[in-house]
Amino acid sequence: MYPFLYRHLLSRIEAEAAHHRGLGLLAALGSSRIGREMLRALAGGHPTQPVQAFGLRFAHPLGLAAGFDKDARCLPALQSLGFSFVEVGTVTPQPQPGNPAPRLFRLPQDKALINRLGFPSAGAEAVSAALRRWQAVSDRQMPVFISLGKNKTTPLTHALDDYRAGLETLYGLGDAFVINISSPNTPELRQLQTRAYLTDLLRGMSEQMKRSAASLTPAPSPTGRGESMAADVLPIPKPLLLKIAPDLEWADVDDIAQTALEQGIAGIIATNTTLDRARLRSPQQREAGGLSGAPLRQRSTAIIRHLHQHTEGHLPIIGVGGIFSHADLMDKLEAGAVLAQAYTGFIYRGPRFVHEVLTENKFTSRLCT
Ligand SMILES: Cc1cc2nc3c(=O)[nH]c(=O)nc-3n(C[C@H](O)[C@H](O)[C@H](O)COP(=O)(O)O)c2cc1C
């Protein structure tokens, strides 16, 4: 049914408008029990394949990548659709509109998207309110990751202040946090991946994680009674991950991994969208922005394999880029990823995406031939 709906309805609506209608529908359906049951029925069941990673439990390895639910509006619906975890955001500390439209393009012949959204965000305070609403109804079965970014107007030299501010506001509301320095759509952002900035950024964020963890822990009572934690034992901060670009030289990937290990980063998300336009067929390839979907698949898998081998498995990896099928998921896991995420595959394949990827229902792409 979804391929039919996509071909005859959704693909005729401008891409970002279709996305907002989809989000609105998901938010509405997710807000009622009957709506969530409808979504569960539509999604089909999926086998449980538990994964333990980052001190968290995941029902299976496939989550939803950052950028789909930027403002945390649809978490109940996304859980009903079967994702084992969702990365919300990227959230900027202050609200910002992002780049001028049009800024999202379909490349159906390539099973791809190009976006230059530029972090449209409701801002950390608004996302914090949305996450509180989610926490009030959540059964805590689906970990939520929060992707943090910087505002466009913040200079690189003050980027740490923005990432820190986002973390301070949202620390109590996520299960893990992701430093996004790999979007191609915020001017100069990717420069934060170079050692000149990265060491200080990661050190500053690791320190903020410890401070935020400590501020969440109740202070020891003067009598010492009723406290499970001794006053001199520091709470363990939640996991902090780093998301990297696919357009890096191998030496840069190695440098980032080394810095991440030195600064106690829990894991790497590989990868964000690419600026590469090789071997595309769709005329929309001329649009500026980050390319996602099938053309990114091999490059992101190569980066995962390289990272896994180079760090001898010491830096857990979440693999993302071009997952449309069970084979694509397995490639990421076999390359060394502990978990995987997808975005573009979900857009093209629809509500049964998780079910189909996990159970390998035969998928013949009527959309993309
Ligand atoms: C429309 C769109 C918006 C995105 N926004 C974000 C974002 O805000 N933060 C981020 O880290 N990644 C963002 N991404 C990148 C995805 O999270 C993912 O890394 C990338 O699309 C590759 O996965 P895919 O091929 O499964 O789509 C976005 C991707 C798309 C298509």
Image: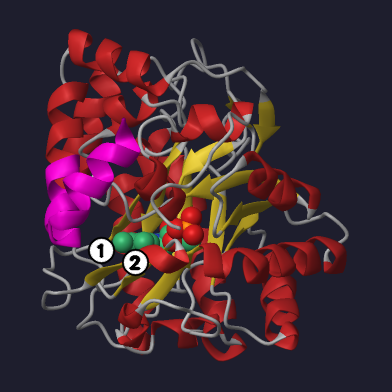
The residue indicated by pointer 2 is: 149
Please report the residue visible at 44 percent of the width from the left and 61 percent of the height from the top: 111
Disc 1 to disc 2: CB gap under 8 Å: yes
Most foreground residue, 18 or 274: 18
Q: Name the element at disc 2.
A: loop
Give the percent coordinates (x, y) of residue 75: 30, 32
Give the percent coordinates (x, y) of residue 334: 80, 48
Q: Is mark 2 within 8 Å of ligand 1?
A: yes
Q: Quadrant of the N terminus?
A: top left
Residue type, mark 1 in image:
Thr
Q: Quadrant of the C terminus?
A: bottom left
Q: Is residue 302 above or below residue 315?
A: below
The residue indicated by pointer 1 is: 92
Q: Is residue 255 above or below residue 69?
A: below
Of the four image quadrants, the one with ligand 1 is: bottom left
User: In the image, 54: left or right of 80?
Assistant: right
Give the percent coordinates (x, y) of residue 100: 11, 78
Q: Earlier in the sequence, mark 1 or mark 2?
A: 1
Q: Is residue 123 visible?
A: no
Most foreground residue, 208 or 323: 323
Tell me where the magenta segment starts and ends, as one range.
Answer: 1-22
Give the percent coordinates (x, y) of residue 357: 57, 35
Q: Is mark 1 within 8 Å of ligand 1?
A: no
